[in-house]
Amino acid sequence: MKKQHLGFIALGVVIGVAAFMGLTAKKAAGEYPYTCTNGTEFSITPSADVSSLTVYPGKNAQVFSDTKLPKVTSNTGALYVGGGVVLFGKGETLQLITASSSVACKPVANKDSAPLNWGD
């Protein structure tokens, strides 16, 4: 009986490790910080398939809170809209648009990872 219990415990550990690896793989895209010409700072985390972004406000970003933005079809670049926030990306630059402003934002230099490229 004890061997059977150990087998179930081992199986549970294997399933738990596999589930953890599957969940963390979806977050592999990472977090990317941006700074804007007006001093606003924020970071974004794209979903694994880049069908949405989560935007996390930083310094001087009082106009929005953590916001998930679904991707919207666009012929001219990457466009994400939701919660009163619009992000339009072309090249490495993002345009952050809210009810009170529209400002250009650039990725913060990071020696460990390249910035996202939103297409030409």
Image (cartoon, grey):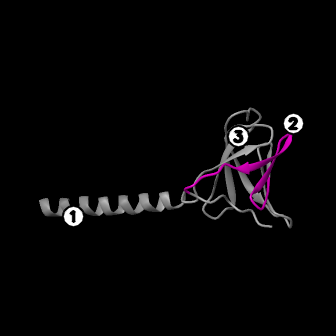
How far apart in space, not on screen, are marks 1 and 3 (Cα)?
51 Å
Q: Is residue 120 above or below residue 92?
A: below
Q: Which part of the image, by quadrant, shows the C terminus?
A: bottom right
For disc 3, the marked residue is 41
**Secondary structure of the residue carrying numbered label 1:** helix
How far apart in space, not on screen, are marks 2 and 3 (Cα)?
16 Å
Front residue of this view, candidates 94 and 87: 94
Amino acid type of disc 2? Ser
Task: Give the magenta part as a residue range.
Answer: 88-112
Asked if labels 3 and 2 touch by Cβ distance under 8 angstroms, the answer is no
Label placed on residue 7: 1
Query: Residue at left 62%, top 60%?
Result: 114
Tell me if residue 109 is in the magenta stretch: yes
Amino acid type of disc 3? Glu
How far apart in space, not on screen, are marks 1 and 2 (Cα)?
60 Å
Q: Position of residue 63 (x, y in %)?
A: 77, 34
Which numbered mark, 1 or 2, is in the foreground of this view? Answer: 2
Label 1 crowding class (10 Å Cα cut-off): few <14, some 14-19, many 20+?
few
Horizontally, is 17 left or right of 83 in the view?
A: left
Q: Is residue 114 above or below residue 60?
A: below
Specify which label sits upstream in the sequence, 1 or 2. Answer: 1
For disc 2, the marked residue is 100
